[in-house]
Image: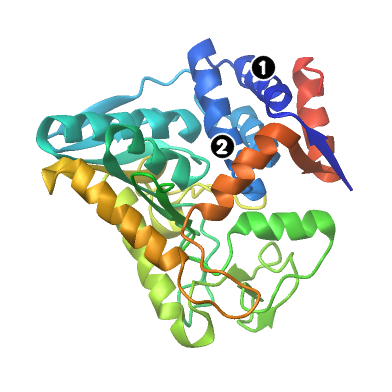
Amino acid sequence: MATTLSYTHLFSFTEAVFKSIGCSDEDATLATETLLAADLRGIDSHGVARLIGYVRLWEAGRINPTPRVGVTYETPSTAVVDGDGGLGLVVGPKAMEVAIEKARQVGTGWVSVKNSNHFGIAGYHAMKALAYDMMGIAMTNASPLVAPTYSLERLLGTNPIAVAVPAGDQPDFVLDMATTTAANGKLEIAQRKNTPIPEGWAQNADGTGSTDPNAVKNGGALLPLGGATGSHKGYGLGAVVDIFSAVLSGANYGPWVPPFVAFLQPSANPVGEGLGHFFGAMRVDAFRPAAEFKAHMDNWITTFRNARAVEGQHVLIPGDPEREMSGKRLIEGIPLLDPVIKDLETVGAKFGVKL
């Protein structure tokens, strides 16, 4: 069963919870906007269902609610940002603003982040560049739940990549994807619904395939994008995200990444500071006139969307389903599964915030 709540109702509740853990009014609003962007876009695995996880990390002393987010090293087009242990929901947007400002000044901006936490959906951060006629890129490493090709050990996260590209009359192109066959949040949804997962999402501790949504909790691992014959490609993409996000910035990487999931504990011997992200912003007019580029993006999008398709289907442009879902949920509300409602009520009770 699911209960539908309005976006404004959920926003008020979530903002109050973030204020209750010590966030400033400004940061609480920013964190809420970042988190609920996932629910609006239909990515329920990364939205308000994870609020209890952020509170749990704060209770464990692993989140600084009042971080001093700042640049520790920079050149005209690059920077390293230290998140000071803050919510990734706050650190991420602020770091992306640094990338955008550098792009404004010199054409492109590249920012690697250390000492942060889970930052919500990557697409939200990449899309911030669109308002400035820029392309946006966002990546992050994540809880070590993924086994590289042929491995029995969990060494990588779902490590998503998002790329946002402005268009003219057509809706913008927004790719937001994990480098695994499925994000861990989809396993969490299957756990709440008590339903099996598709083959190819996860493996058991002995390396055999599994349809058990609890396989990863029980010592198994998520699998890289690409399936039985192409997982080396997803593994490679996840590795690139890890290197750009953490080896480059000084954050923890690989199996040392501090986990968001409750069933794993942080490493006793970290190799860096917190979790890492990577952001990029590129001014379109650093390459060709923006209007000219966007006209050709419209042509590109229209050509692909109108391609002949198999019966009963149509060709989608990355970002189409999420954009349509966002419009729908702003009007009709956001459906939440009963276990999520229960978690939110539990969180609210901690701070006297009524759902």
Residue under pointer 2: 37
Residue under pointer 1: 16
Which residue is at 52% across, 66% downward?
A: 146
The amino acid on which the numbered mark 2 sits, given as a three-letter code, is Ala
The amino acid on which the numbered mark 1 sits, given as a three-letter code, is Ala
How busy is the neighbourhood of tag 2: few (under 14 within 10 Å), some, or many (20 plus)?
A: many
Q: Nearer the viewer, mark 2 or mark 1?
A: 2
The local secondary structure at tag 1 comes to helix
Real-space Cα separation, disc 2 to disc 1, in angstroms: 17 Å
Which residue is at 68% across, 38% downward?
A: 329
Which tag, 2 or 1, sits closer to the chain's start? 1
Which residue is at 45% across, 46% downward?
A: 122
Relative to 161, is 88 above or below?
Answer: above
Quarter of the figure with the C terminus: top right
Q: Which of 196 and 251 is in front in this view?
A: 196
Relative to 89, is 238 above or below?
Answer: below
Q: Which of 84 and 355 is in front in this view?
A: 355
Which residue is at 53% across, 86% downward?
A: 228
